[in-house]
Amino acid sequence: MQVLLPVIMAVFWAVRAANRKKSGSVAVSAGSHPAGTSITGQALLRGLGIALLPFIWLLLLTAAVSDPNLERIPPLAAALALTVLCFPVWVAPLCRKLPVSVGYYLTLSVGFNWARSHGVAGAVIVAARARRLNEREGDWLMTRLRNSPHCHALTWVAAGAVRANRGDVKVARLLFGIAARMTPMPGAEPARRLAREWLIAEAVQRGAWTEARSWAADGRGIHAYVTSLGSVVDVFATGRGAATAARTMSAHLRFGLASRLRAHRGAVPNARGLPTAWPDQLGRALALHARAREGRRVEDVQAACAAWDDVAGNAELGSWVRARADTLRAAADPLERLLGRSIAELAEVMWRERWFHTGTGTFGRVSDAAMDRAWPELKDRALAAYGLAETPERVLYAHDAFLAWEPLRVLAAAMIRDRPNDRGTIFQTMYSGSLHLAVVLYNKRGFRYFGNMVFRWLQMEGEGVMTDTLGGVLAGNIRSGI
Amino acid sequence: MNPFRVLGITVDASRMEVERAGQKLLAQLEIGAMSAKYVGEGEQRVQRTPEMVRAAVTALRDPDARIEAELVALATECVLPPVAGVSIWDELGLGFTRPK
C-alpha cells in the first residue's frame, strides 16, 4: 500500500500535466472539450484509463482483502478516489451528471443555503425543484440571471421558476416551454426534464389534456403516467379509444381513477354533438368568443378559433349572407368582416396573454379578405415588440428580449404553417424588425445568444423568399459567431 | 347590444320600420316613459339611452352592419358548460403546486 500510493500520485500528476499542456486551460467546464487536445490525444488518454484503472483497482482490493487490519480502509478509499481523478477525460462525463442530481439532494440534506453560493447552476436547479421562493431569494436569483450573459437551459428554468412562484403563470409557461424545447446540450437534460414536469403538471391542472400529453410524448416515468391519464379521459369524454386506454394503463389506475374522472367530465371538451345548422354554429362561436375574450384559458381561445373556422366553412350560411347582401346591395362581405374582426380580437387576447397555441388550421380556413382585416391588428402588435430596439436600456436581460420577441415568432410560425401561400408576406413583415432588434441588442448590450437565435430563425424561415443580399448578411453574422 | 334588440324590432323589419321605431323610442325617452327606459330582462337588463338608439338606427342603415346584426340576432343562443375548477392532479396528491 505504501508503495502503491506514491505510484498512483505520480501517475495522477503526470496525466494531469499532460492534459493541461495540451488543453492550455486549467478547468474543463461541463459541456466543453479541452481546446487544442487532438482527437488522437483524447483517445490515447481514454484508452490508457480504461486499460490501467481496473488493474489498479484490482491491486488495491487484493491488498485490502489480504490485510485484516481495518485501519487501512480510509487510505484505501482515498487511493480509490485518487485513481478516479487520475483519468479525468474518462470519468468527466460521469462526473458532470452526478452533481446535478445527487448534489441537489445532498445540499438539501445538510441544509445548504444556496443563496450564499456563487454557483448559479446549482442554485437554479435548487430553485426550480423547490418551487417556492421567498421575495429575497427570488430577487437574488433574478439579479444573478441579469448579470449572466448566457442563456443556458438552466437559466430559463430558473427564470420560469421565479415567475411561477410570483404567480405569473403565463410567462412561466413560456419560459419553461423554451427550456423544454431547447436543443440538448451537455448538462441541460435535467433542466429540460424539470421544465417538462412543470409544464405537464400545469397543463393537467388547467384541464389541457392535449397539451399535457404533447409534453409527455417521450413516455417515460411521470410522462407515461400523464399519457395514461389522457387516454382514460378520452375514453370517458368521447367513448372512443378504450382499446388504447386498456393497453396503456394498469388495472388499478383505470378503476381507481374512473370515479374521479366521471366527476370532472365537464372539464373535457365534448367532441360529440357539434351543431351543423348555421344559427347553432354561429351561436356557439359567439358564446365561445365571449368566453375567450376574458383571457382566462388558452383552450377557450383554441375552441373559439375552431368555432369560427366552422362558421367560415358553413356553405348554408355563406349562401344566406350572399343572398342578403344582394338584396341590401352591401358593398363588402359582412361575414368576412365579422370573421376578420373576431380573429383579430382573438389574436389580441393571445398576444396579451402570451399564448400562441393556435393549432393546425386555425387561420387556414379563414379567407384572405378576413385575414387582411386581421393583419393590421397583428402588425400593430408586432411593431410594439420592435420598440424595444429603440430603447435597449429597457431590456434588463436577455430573457426580456426573448419574452418580447417569442410571441411574434410563434405567431409568424403559426401563420406560415396555416397559410403557406402568404409565407413571403409574413416573412417580410417579421424580418426587418427582428433583424434590427437583434443587431441593436447585440451592439449595445452584447446579447450574443439572442442575436444568434434570431438570425438562425430568419435564415430558416426566409429560405426561398428572402433576397440573396439578406441571406448573405445573415450567414455572415452567424459565421462570425453572433 | 344588438341593434334589433335596442330598437325592439324583428330581424325582417323594413327600413321604414327601423326609422319609425327609432323615432318613437327617442320621443318616449325624451318624456321619460318607463316603457322605453330599459331593454332586456333579468341579468341582461340595461338602461336604454338616446345615444344607444341613434347608434342602432345608424348601424341598421349600413347594409354591411345590418347583415352582421341579423346574423347575431338569428344565431341560436348557446349555453356553454361551466369551466372546471378542481384539478384531478391535486386529488391524486402528487405534490405539485397549483398555479395561482
Image (cartoon, coloured by chain):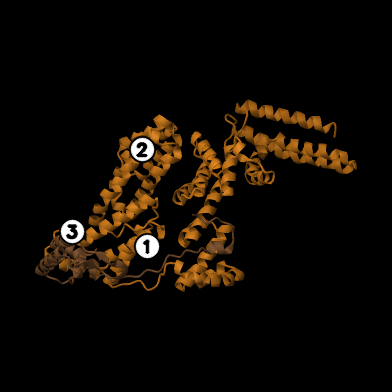
Chain colours: A orange, B brown
Q: Residue furthest left?
A: B16
Between the C-alphas of marks 2 and 1, the distance is: 32 Å
Residue A445 in the image, given as x and y percentages of width and height: 42, 31
Residue A344 in the image, given as x and y percentages of width and height: 29, 54
Query: Which mark's residue is nearer the viewer, 3 or 2?
Result: 3
Q: Is residue A122 above or below residue A297?
A: above
- The secondary structure type at the circle numbered 3 is helix
Chain identity of mark 2: A
Chain identity of mark 3: B
Q: Which residue is mark 3?
A: B51
- The secondary structure type at the circle numbered 2 is helix
User: Which residue: 23% across, 67% down?
Assistant: B38
Look at label 3 and name its amino acid.
Answer: Glu
Q: Which residue is mark 2?
A: A388
Q: Is residue A42 left or right of residue A430?
A: right
Look at label 2 and name its amino acid.
Answer: Leu
**What number is the disc on residue A405?**
none
Q: Which residue is mark 1?
A: A303
Q: Is residue A177 above or below residue A387?
A: below
Viewer-nearest residue: B40 or A373:
B40
